[in-house]
Amino acid sequence: MTAEEIKDYAENIGKLVTFFGYTSCSLQSSTAFGFAWENKDSGHSKVLFHIIWNSTCNHYFLNGGAYDHEEEILLLDGTAAKVESVEEIKNEKGEVLYTLIKMKS
């Protein structure tokens, strides 16, 4: 995500935001982090969403088939979640490793 996109989430702490399109998630943070990417030339930074999901609808658990090790959760188009926090995760030198956005259904 770009700095502007991350800022949008920070400005919406405490509010519901809507996911557009089907959103692929994983129960394993290590799997999800493997999909995070950055590109300094385009201004994109790594972002990890941690979503606490308490809803019984608007998702599919896709733990089967060729990629069952991913423990994938697919959120339906238009699903909303509340932004809880936006935090930069840094290494021991103070360099930003990624941004953690916590959300709740």
Image (tube, rainbow, N blue to C red):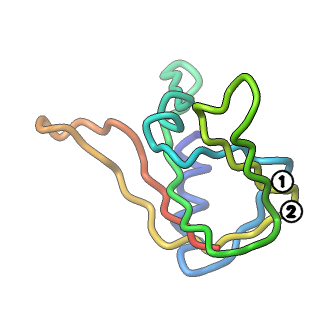
Residue 51 vs 70, above or below: the answer is: below
Res 104 quadrant in image: bottom right
Sooner in the amino-acid sequence: mark 1 or mark 2: 1
Q: Which numbered circle lies on residue 93?
A: none
Q: How many residues crowd around disc 1 within 10 Å: few (fewer than 14), some, or many (20 or more)?
A: few
Residue 63 vs 84, above or below: the answer is: above
Q: Circle 1 is placed at which residue position?
A: 20
Residue 11 vs 86, above or below: the answer is: below
The percent coordinates of residue 19 (x first, y second) are 77, 57
Which amino acid, by three-letter code, is at mark 1?
A: Phe
The percent coordinates of residue 88 (x first, y second) are 35, 51
Residue furthest to the left: 92
- Report helix, strand or loop for mark 1: loop
What residue do we see at 69% from left, 41% from top? 63
- Report helix, strand or loop for mark 2: loop
What residue do we see at 44% from left, 61% from top? 86
What residue do we see at 50% from left, 28% from top? 34
Quadrant occupied by the N terminus: top right
Q: Do callouts 1 and 2 mark residues in contact (Cβ within 8 Å)?
A: yes
The answer to which of 1 and 49 lies nearer the viewer is 49
Q: Which numbered circle lies on residue 78?
A: 2
Q: How many residues crowd around disc 2 within 10 Å: few (fewer than 14), some, or many (20 or more)?
A: some
